[in-house]
Image (tube, helix red, strand yellow):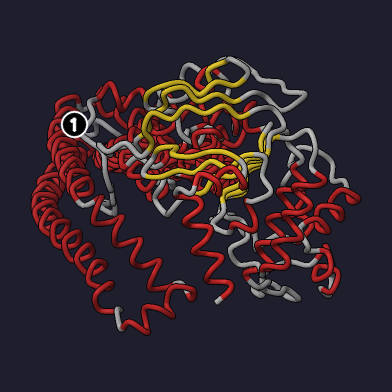
Amino acid sequence: MNMSLSPTSGSKIDNKGILSNTWWILKINFRILPLLSIARIIGLINNYSSSLVSSFVMGILIDAVLRYASNNALRDGVVSAITIYGIYYVLRGLAAVLRNYGENLTGFKLAYEIPESMLLEKLHSLSTSSLESPEIQNKITRYRENRHVFQNMSGTLYNMIGVVVTFIIGFIPVLINFPLLALLIVVVGIPSLVMNKRFIDKLWKIGKETTVLGRRSGAMVGFLSSPSSLKEIKLLNAYTSLHKYFSEYTTTYYSKRRKAYNEWTIIDLILDLLNGGVIIFGISVIINTAINNQISIGQIAFYIAAINSIGSQLGSFTTYLAEHSGSSQRLDEMRSLLEYKDENRSNNKKILRLNAPPLLELKNVYFKYPNQTKNVLKNLNLNIQPGEKIAIVGENGAGKTTLVKLISNIYPVTIGELLVNGDNLNDIEPSSWFENMGVLYQDYNTYDDLTVLDNIALGQPDEPVNMKAVIDAAKKADAYEFINAYPNKFDQILSERYEGGIRPSTGQWQKIAIARFFYRNAPILILDEPTASIDAVAEANIFNRIYQFIENKTVIIISHRFSTVRNADRIIVMDKGEIVEQGTHKELLTLNGIYANAYNTQAKGYRD
């Protein structure tokens, strides 16, 4: 019996769920891989029935030879039997070729392409608040751990089809000639089905109980194997402290599975002995029948092969069905992610088309992060006029980044309204809103497996690359000079992991990200501390271009450097999740409040 199952999470599901998942995976196979699926089924039927059919054909040949030995006039029967065997041999080889062809070509698609593409499409459709929830993170972890289920469940399904067809081929003639023996073999095989299902459920429960430990273990393995994080771990001498999370998971998971497998193996051995006794009894019945001249010598081989086939196929079926049930449980969990209804996206209907920057209004807005009880933003009221350039300042934790995440629809507001030209942002299709925004957060992405050109052109991923605009964006970002100095210029790949690749400095990466932001050329531009790794001169050049040359666009800037924000049309001062001051640089200095105090402190530091 095959007991190589490793379920990781989920809950026990009933036969209805197994049938639903079987039908779901079958539809995927025959929608995407119809001919290859048929080839696999034909090949597997041939594989499982090969010994049985061979015994039948060989029995015909033996009987023909025996008849020829007693009567020379029956020579033609031997020739016919040999011809039949030859034809069968050729067809068997052809079916084996079809099986290998189907399995080899479907393997990649079922093991990687299909499950990964479905996951990526689903994750793209989810809101950030959903993506960051523990429930969804657990589902994503289990999905990736169980991605092989598409291939495994397809395999067990095809194997079961092959086994059932072969079982029928052997069972019908035995049932007709030895009905009690046929029924006895079936009855003895039923306990294996029950016990296999029981232990699959037990392993599944173990997997679910250790999911959180597994997630933490995987994260620690990532830290302990990443060159970027190993430096600090070595300096802190933290290897042992982090490795213990890996050891805790592997020890707990292994010990629980070993206990279950020990019990399963003992019961399986007992059932195998019982099945073996029934087969031996069946062989004695067949031989006794032949002695009494009720069947021919050639038929002895077929019926012995048939009862062996019935027992073997029944055992294989129970094993495959148990595996299929385990795969179904994993698939059930995966489908729960693929079919997850995002409440934060369910009512978005309106497609937004902007020809100019919109009016943005926040009315009595409160916000708290998922699974948190404390409001990060409290009673915000703010209007941002079309084409206005505003700056948001405040201490760390004041809510600046959270505010722009609401505006960019990364999160929905908890209480209140965020209006775009009078329409509630929650009623706007997110993708259509994203198309109108260029956002650069302080934790921007570095696509180091791509070239400079690829990194910048991602600003408009659905449009043909405009090289003139790419160069212009690079110049605005103060990046053109060092890009032009690269060996391959804009075609330079940005990772030393590739031949001829280079690793940009942190400041260079930041400028490349800003170039992508400029290339985006959207009606609303948001920059959240985008120049932390850039020197003051380069930063001044970049923001001077933003203030002087970007027209007919709403610009929202978050920065701690007052030299960056002082030229904004309006400066918003936040403190503890609230707007406490707003106005121009001069107006805020006149107020002599939080902004003026922070500005004077920073200015004094520069003078000193």
- Residue 132 showing in the rendered view: yes
Amino acid on which the number 1 mark rests in the picture: Val
Across and down, in percent, residue 331 comes to 36, 36
Across and down, in percent, residue 320 comes to 31, 40
Q: Nearer the viewer, residue 424 or 287?
A: 424
Query: Which quarter shows the C terminus?
Result: bottom right
Residue at 66% across, 75% down: 496
Residue at 25% across, 36% down: 373
Residue at 64% across, 51% down: 566
Q: Nearer the viewer, residue 596 or 35?
A: 596
Residue at 14% across, 62% down: 255
Reply above or below: 326 against 251: above
Q: Nearer the viewer, residue 499 or 232?
A: 232
Label 1 element class: helix
Count of marks overlaid on the render: 1
Q: Is residue 512 left or right of residue 228?
A: right
- Residue 302 showing in the rendered view: no
Q: Label 1, on which residue?
A: 186
Reply above or below: 396 against 158: below
Across and down, in percent, residue 196 comes to 18, 42
- Crowding at mark 1 (Cα within 10 Å: few <14, some 14-19, many 20+): some
Q: Residue furthest right?
A: 468
Q: Is residue 300 left or right of residue 355?
A: left
Q: Nearer the viewer, residue 531 or 248?
A: 531
Identify the image quadrant of residue 396: bottom left
Across and down, in percent, residue 332 comes to 34, 32
